[in-house]
Image (cartoon, helix red, strand yellow):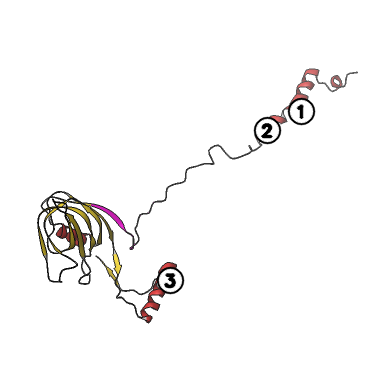
Amino acid sequence: MDFNYSLGLSRGESDSDAGASSGGGAPGTSSNRRPRGRPPGSKNKPKPPIIVTRDTPNALRSHVLEVSTDVDIMESISNYARRRGRGVCILSGSGTVANVNIRQPASPAATVVTLHGRFEILSLSGTVLPPPAPPGSSGISIFLSGGQGQVVGGSVVGPLMASGPVVLMAASFANAVFERLPLEEEDAAAANANANANASGVGAPTTQYEFE
């Protein structure tokens, strides 16, 4: 006697129920399983760039300054330093100048030599500080080449007129520490302490000229 017929069930119904109970659980089990590994696109993401939005007070800035023809180079640099509120250190220069007044190292302090004509700039360097800078802290030195190949140089006195476009390579800074040399023993110890404090990031009292 067939057991299924005794329960009032057909063979087809019994087979379908058995298939559902045995094979129907497999899809449900696989759908709840979490995939292995990282999700797609979760690694090797580009990192955002680091952008510095504020300079430190002691940071140097590089500049390329162009001075037009028939303009006083000395006055232009002084006005630039005063209006920007930064000290300017001239690193090099190129171009031509005319009718230069210089004080040569071998000449007496009050002797000023005037060079007439056009000259090619071989070297131009110095520092110009805006107020309130101490007196004598600014100055420009120049070396020139004449039309006959002669080379002459010294400290610039008075105007320095450009007879053509002059290009200057310069660096600027916001403040400077003024110290007198030679240092005494106590001053040397204080200077070492200030240097160590600045290296460790701890502020120390110093005499600074902050340009505004």
Q: Mark 1, mark 2: which one is toward the viewer?
A: 2
- Between tags 3 and 2, which lies in front? 3
Q: Main secondary structure of the magenta part?
A: loop
Sequence-wise first label, 1 or 2: 1
Whether residue 36 is situated above or below residue 106 in the rendered picture:
above
Q: Residue at x 15, y 69 (%)?
A: 107
- Density class for disc 3 (Cα within 10 Å; few <14, some 14-19, many ≥20) is some
Q: CA distance from mark 3 to mark 1?
A: 79 Å
Please report the bounds of the magenta region as a residue range: 51-64
Which circle's residue, 3 or 2, is located before the other in the chain?
Answer: 2
Alpha carbon distance from label 3 to label 2: 66 Å
**Is residue 197 positioned above or below 74 on the image?**
below
**Residue at (78% x, 21% y) in the render:** 15
Q: Which residue is mark 1?
A: 22
> Is residue 158 shown left or right of residue 139?
left
In the image, what residue type sits under mark 1? Ser
Residue 19 is drawn in which quadrant? top right
Q: Is residue 197 magenta?
A: no
Residue receiving disc 2: 30
Instruction: Pick the residue in front: 80 or 71.
Output: 71
**Depth order, front residue of 127/200:** 127
How packed is label 2: few (under 14 Cα within 10 Å), some, or many (20 or more)?
few
| Residue contact between numbered discs 3 and 2, judged by CB atoms under 8 Å | no
Identify the residue under disc 3. 196
